Amino acid sequence: MKIAAMPPLVKIRSERDQMSAIERRIADFILDNAHLLRDYSSQQLASALGVSQSSVVKFSQKLGFRGYPDLKFSIGQALARNGGDAPAGVPEEPGDAYARLEETLRRSKAAAEEETRLINPRERIEAIVGMLDGAGKVFVCGLGDDGLFAREFAMRLSLLGVLVVHHADPILMMANISAARPGDVLLLFSEFGQLAPLHQLSRQFQACEGKVVSITRHTANPLRAQADAALVVSAHDPAPHVAQLLYRSSLQYLLDFLFVLLCQANPDRHRQLNINLERIQHLIES
């Protein structure tokens, strides 16, 4: 059986939402205890989780591995490549603390962006680019911190000559949805996909025969399930404040790539971008 090209922990995260309850239990343990996995046999892992040994074996095979030892070896290799197997108990020299913290954050952001790239396949990205490029109007909404990304992306779409309707207030956006027509697109930014006002916007927009694209974390959430298409962001770290930074970094990467693809997909859009940037520069210099 061919081993998946996607890194094992990324693959587990990417497929978790489609797993059974027992499979999710195994997946969550592995994701939370990847560094300890080398000390567990399939029987020990099964006993710790209260599942059968065959469940652990079938879980590994479903991911594309020959068996549990193959999965464990692959995870060990991935951790080693990412510096996860540094010798424990080695004292950290005071002079290195700054550099180590800087390097750890840099590598964490790079890993989160790579995971985000892997869980958003090319065909999905290209389909969304096609939806945005062909839309008569693009509606954009995000609340709180998500609103900052929504506002910036709405501005970038405007620079490409896309007719954009942007609101950070769901009530104002609901009023504007009456202008939606078939083929229009609504981009909804919501990190956790749980905000009820955005669900209502999504339903009303779809009732107008528009297409909804959600941008959320790579979790099972109502907004993502309801959307016609979904962009997902990977950002995992034991420290909540670091996980938030990884989310912002990965989301920005994803939006930047989407913008570049839109520039390349339509020469007229690219030409309009250059015209608008020149006009803006003229205003700044005048």
Image (cartoon, rainbow, N blue to C red):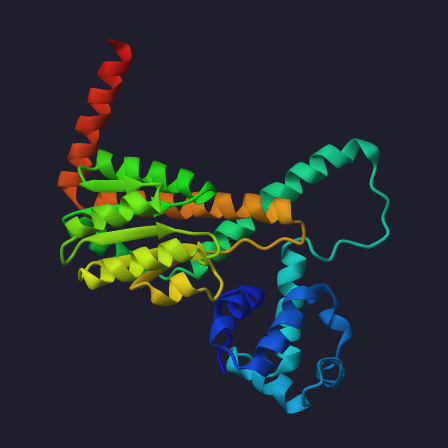
Identify the residue at the far top of this view: 286
In this view of the protein, which residue sits in the foreground, 53 or 264? 53
Q: Can the viewer see residue 40 in this picture?
A: yes
Please indicate whether residue 191 sits to the left or right of residue 187 in the image.
right
Q: Position of residue 129 (x, y in %)?
A: 25, 53
Q: Position of residue 8 (x, y in %)?
A: 56, 68
Please indicate whether residue 32 sits to the left or right of residue 266 in the image.
right
Q: Position of residue 116 (x, y in %)?
A: 46, 55
Image height of 106 relative to 57, above or below: above
Q: Position of residue 168 (x, y in %)?
A: 36, 41
Residue sitting at x 31%, y 55% = 201
Which quadrant would residue 216 be assigned to in this image?
A: bottom left
Image height of 144 relative to 202, above or below: above
| Numbered-mark total | 0
Q: Can the viewer see residue 122 in this picture?
A: no
Residue sitting at x 23%, y 34% = 159
User: Where does the C terminus fall, quadrant-wise?
Assistant: top left
Image height of 65 relative to 235, above or below: below
Residue sitting at x 39%, y 59% = 120
Which quadrant would residue 208 be assigned to in this image?
A: bottom left
In this view of the protein, which residue sits in the foreground, 128 or 186? 186
Image height of 209 relative to 108, above or below: below
Which quadrant would residue 32 be assigned to in this image?
A: bottom right
Please indicate whether residue 261 sits to the left or right of residue 180 in the image.
right
